[in-house]
Amino acid sequence: MHEIVTLQVGQCGNQIGNVFWKKMCREHKILLDGRLQMEQSDRKDVLFYQADDFSYIPRAILIDLEPRVISQCLPLFNRENIFVSSEGGGAGNNWAHGYYVGNQCKADVLDIVQREVESCDSLETFILMHSVAGGTGSGFGSLMLENLRDNYPKKIITSFSILPTNEESSDVVVQPYNTVLSLNYLNRFTDSIVAMDNHAIGKVTMDSARVKNVSFDQLNSLVSTVI
Ligand SMILES: Nc1nc2c(ncn2[C@@H]2O[C@H](COP(=O)(O)OP(=O)(O)OP(=O)(O)O)[C@@H](O)[C@H]2O)c(=O)[nH]1
Ligand SMILES: [Mg+2]
């Protein structure tokens, strides 16, 4: 079995992860509390493992520097795989803050990663979901890439990265700096990067769903289909 472990970092990463895992549950006929809805022969083990009570648990690791988004995540996830910084204030759209705080608590996160890797038969891929415009997904995400490459040099690392949109629709003024710093790490430590931008996926969604305003949920639905 060639398993996949996902890491969702920051607000954007965790919101995308939530939609992604909902989709995976639907595909594999698993209810959102991990119970099996219907038996079907498929390769669930690539993405899920079975707990002692036979419920299916995603091979997912959730990371953020503030609790707001993670507190709304699905009940499906293993609570021990959730890392929220005790500081709790987020990275304030500052790459360096995300990287620095991440570096201080990386031992805890790497323990979670190691536990997850050890539960795999033969891990193949890490998937990172994040945006590079804020502070946590970009800075902490970069730190994770560096450490994953260092600790697991032979595993495939793939990122699904939300890149900033054009200036008019941007909500983070320092996003060019966060992006350039993140791209350096993405370039050095991943095997493949799937880059998407909210403006472009927003346009696709607007055209196909025939709506004027697109919510993050609609954007994330398209992103998770791509993943
Ligand atoms: N597609 C998509 N983009 C998002 C979502 N949430 C935030 N973004 C975009 O991500 C960028 C901001 O990054 P966030 O993920 O909010 O920031 P963060 O990683 O949590 O970092 P800090 O909040 O600074 O600690 C902005 O460009 C947002 O438009 C989401 O759910 N989906
Ligand atoms: Mg945040």
Image: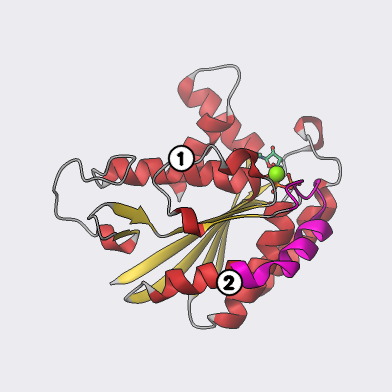
Query: What is the CA distance from the residue labelled 2 to the residue labelled 1?
Result: 24 Å
The segment highlighted magenta reads 87-108
In-image side of 13 versus 17 (left or right): right
As for residue 98 lying within the magenta part, the answer is yes
Q: Amino acid at mark 2?
A: Leu
Indicate yes or no whether the magenta region holds residue 51: no
Q: Position of residue 117 (x, y in %)?
A: 43, 73
* Rendered image: mark on residue 150: none
* Residue at left offset 71%, top offset 68%: 185
Give the residue pinned by disc 2: 110
Which callout, 2 or 1, points at the residue further toward the start of the chain? 1
User: What is the quadrant of the N terminus in the image?
Assistant: bottom left
Vertical arrangement, residue 109 with respect to residue 67, above or below:
below
The answer to the question of whether label 2 and label 1 lie on touching residues, with beta carbons closer than 8 A, is: no
In-image side of 124 versus 200 (left or right): left
Q: Position of residue 141 (x, y in %)?
A: 66, 60
Residue at image x 37%, y 41%?
A: 23
Q: Which residue is mark 1?
A: 19
Q: Position of residue 83 (x, y in %)?
A: 59, 56
